[in-house]
Structure formats: C-alpha cells, structure tokens
Amino acid sequence: MSNHTSGPYTVYGMSLSGSCHKVRLILDLAGAGYEWRETDTRAKATRTPEYLELNPAGEVPLLVTPNGRRLPQSNAILYYIATVENTRFWPADEYARG
C-alpha cells in the first residue's frame, strides 16, 4: 500500500520566488489539484510559531499532501509530483531521464 494520496495538495509559497514558481508550474502541468497559500517571507510569515510547526526550517515552498505529510524543498517537491502524479516529467527509461 502506498504512503501517499495524490491531490489536492496544499502549497505554502511566495509568488515572487523562482523555487515556488517551479512548484506551481509542475502542479499546473500535471493537472494536480492544489490550494496555494501565499506566504510572504519578507513579512516574516515563515517565522511564526504556526508556520515553524509545519516546517521547522522556516522556508518556502512547502507541499502538504492530502494525508498531512509535509515535503519542503522545491526539487524534492518536483520529483515527488512528477512520480506520484505519473507525469511525463520523470520517464521510466533511464536514458530519457538523463
């Protein structure tokens, strides 16, 4: 049995961040449902006790899966979405992945 449930996801991110943008992009391209929660790092929104409980590193982006698991770091999120949502962005063929 799998430890994940695909979409809808919750994403904490800041629209001005390139790392957050690429997470939003893969979710859109994968057709995965998600709720975007704008989280302004400049206003210290990632330093509140509530946010630090979600992500002790106090960074965005942060993906929360439907079953409540939290995944920080944009590249980890890209890999997760590419594989969980069975997208063309992580081909089965090793050569094609290269």
Image (cartoon, grey):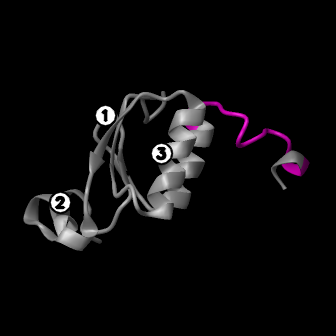
Residue 64 in the image: above or below residue 18: above
Label 3 residue SS: helix
Q: CA distance from mark 3 to mark 1?
A: 20 Å
Provide the residue designation for mark 3: 24
Residue 12 in the image: above or below residue 10: below
- Identify which amino acid the numbered label 1 is placed on: Asn
Q: x and y percent of residue 25 in the render?
A: 54, 44
Image quarter where the C terminus lies is bottom right
Q: x and y percent of residue 49 in the render?
A: 9, 65
Residue 31 in the image: above or below residue 70: above
How many residues crowd mark 2 within 10 Å: few (<14), some (14–19), many (20+)?
A: some
Name the residue at 27% across, 46% down. 37
Res 91 → quadrant = top right
Frontmost residue, 89 versus 14: 14
Residue extending farthest front = 16
Residue 50 in the image: above or below residue 87: below
How many residues crowd mark 1 within 10 Å: few (<14), some (14–19), many (20+)?
A: few
Q: Earlier in the sequence, mark 3 or mark 2?
A: 3
Does the magenta run of residues contain 90? yes
| 38 on left or right of 45 | right
- Identify which amino acid the numbered label 2 is placed on: Tyr
Provide the residue designation for mark 2: 51
Label 1 residue SS: loop
Q: CA distance from mark 3 to mark 2?
A: 19 Å
Q: CA distance from mark 2 to mark 1?
A: 18 Å
